[in-house]
Image: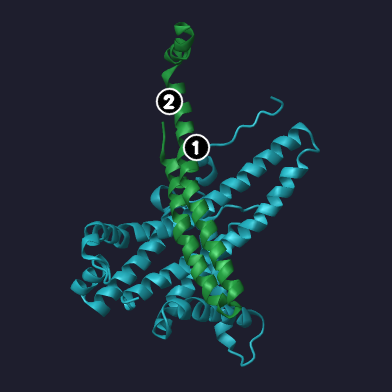
Amino acid sequence: MLLHLLAPLHFFATQDSGELLKGLTAVGRGIVYGGAAIGPGIGIGIVVGNAITAMARQPEAAGMVRTTMFLGIAFTEALALFGFVLAFIISG
Amino acid sequence: MLLALDFPPVSHLVEWGPIWGHGAFAINKVVLEMWVAVALTSAVFIVAGRKRALVPTGVQNMAEAAIDFVQNGIIMETIGPDGLLYTPYLLTLFSFILACNLVGLIPGIQMPVMARYALPVFMALVTYVIYNVVAVVKQGPLKYLKNVMFMPGVPKGMYVLLTPIEFFTQFLIQPFSLSLRLFANLLAGHLILVTFAVLTTALWEATKIGFALPFALLVVLTGFELLVAVLQAYIFTILSAVYIGRAMHPDH
């Protein structure tokens, strides 16, 4: 039983450590970008949703709302893009 | 596996060898595209400015629409009437970024100029210098720092947290995020197009029929990239305008 539990560790220990590092780097990149995309995804949804509500209520203010909406999207999206670039910067 | 898909490393997709010259001043494909964009924008505005017909047609119409968009759609919405002074700078930014993005989308060329970091970061630094100089001239250096670091109407205790955040945002993160937004959006778009192009090629070699779906997606996504090209030019310009406006009117 214990041997079965330890088997993966043994497997890792015998692998070429360069290969392991490469694999873990790829996993890390995925986690970095995936994690960075969660918050901005929700944030952009809120920004655009509220902007649509505002435009539907006051169509005459649509131009101003749209400008502000794009600003809000741009500020929120920056966080996801930091994650995107960071994912490329990470190297094994 | 039926298909041996090997996605090329990212450095292969954005690094282009020199066509002429060598070293830091070598001319490669990206530089050529940038020159084409500069020539295009200059040509449009020079041709439009030469005749100055009362009823604009053709090129003049296009140039006037661009100026009207920058003045009414960007400056009046963010800075106000006293920001019209910055029309030349903001119009240059908008038309240059737009031309670069559009040239980079032409099938056969397909390399967005702004997917190399040097150009966005240079433009962001120009904006950074402009808004800091404007703020120092309009508000005075000490008042500028005070306005940035101690925004009014906040409880006293919050300044412990807020002052360093505002300071770093204003002087470090703002130019960084301004340039990174343009760069990363176009790099991401380029990578998506490459992904579907690689898939199309692989499926064409393997099956001859299965390439239709990724190819259709490639075409659709190129259309989407067209939207991104216009939107990113707009966002870069409007954010520059917002930063300059904030330097001119710190109270709101």
Residue B180 occupies quadrant: bottom left
User: Which chain is mark 2 on?
Assistant: A
Q: Quick check: can you spot residue B32?
A: no
Nearer to us of marks 1 and 2 is 1
Q: Which residue is mark 2?
A: A21
Seen from this angle, which residue lies furthest left? B142
Badge 1 local density, few (<14 within 10 Å), some, or many (20+)? Answer: some
Residue at 37% x, 75% y: name it. Answer: B245
Query: As drawn, is A77 to the left or to the right of B173?
Result: right
Q: Quadrant of the N terminus of chain B?
A: top right
Which numbered disc flags the more N-terminal residue, 1 or 2? 2
Q: Quadrant of the C terminus of chain B?
A: bottom left
Tell me, what hue is chain A?
green
Is residue B132 positioned above or below B32 on the image?
Answer: below
- As drawn, the label of residue A30 is 1
- Amino acid bearing label 2: Leu
Tell me, what hue is chain B?
cyan
Residue B205 occupies quadrant: top right
- Amino acid bearing label 1: Gly
Q: Nearer the viewer, residue B63 or B49?
A: B63
Mark pair 1, 2: CA separation: 14 Å
Judging from the image, the colouring scheme is by chain
How many marks overall? 2
**Helix, strand or loop status at disc 1:** helix
User: Which chain is mark 1 on?
Assistant: A
